[in-house]
Amino acid sequence: MNSLEQAEDLKAFERRLTEYVSCLQPATGRWRMILIVVSVCTAAGAWNWLIDPETQKVSFFTSLWNHPFFTISCITLIGLFFAGIHKRVVAPSIIAARCRTVLAEYNMSCDDTGKLILKPRPHVQ
């Protein structure tokens, strides 16, 4: 394989990697927004739950029943984590990190957008 074919292969690999990472970005942004909204709702519900004087006077389950906003948002947050939202939020960086691991063997790396970084060849003496 000559150097022209190698360069074309590298360009094709880079195009495909950047395409894949860029396709993940919109979904990742949506998942981040969902996580932020549910987290803020849970925090606001927790604050209201904690400052309510009735919370200390009744049983735990009764206090949860009296604060359905907190209860529902907390269950939603737990469900999202069980569904793997923590992986979906960071999916592009996971892909880039795995590519960096493989590309290191070939004196290459990539940035978070999928662009290849060619490192200088080590000098063998």
Image (cartoon, helix red, strand yellow):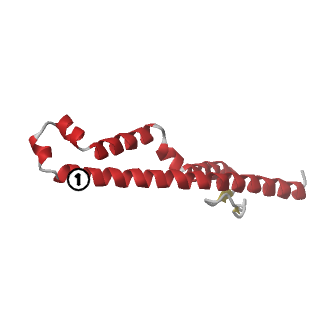
Residue 10 appears at what percent x and percent y? 79, 55
68 to the left or right of 85: left
User: In the structure shown, which secondary structural element does the residue marked by tag 1 occupy?
Assistant: helix
Image x and y of residue 55, in percent: 15, 45
Q: Give above or below for 121 relative to 91.
A: below
> Given the image, on which type of amino acid does mark 1 rest?
Asn
Comparing 109 with 30, the one in front is 30
Task: Tell me: 58 left or right of 124.
Answer: left
Locate residue 17, reporting x and y percent. 71, 53
Q: Residues within 10 Å of mark 1 (few under 14, many from 20)?
A: some
- Residue at the disc numbered 1: 48
Seen at 19% across and 40% down, the residue is: 63
| Residue at (44, 41) in percent of width and height | 80
Q: Quadrant of residue 18?
A: bottom right
Looking at the image, the residue that sits furthest to the left is 57
What residue appears at the point 12 percent right and 39 percent down from the top-left corner?
58
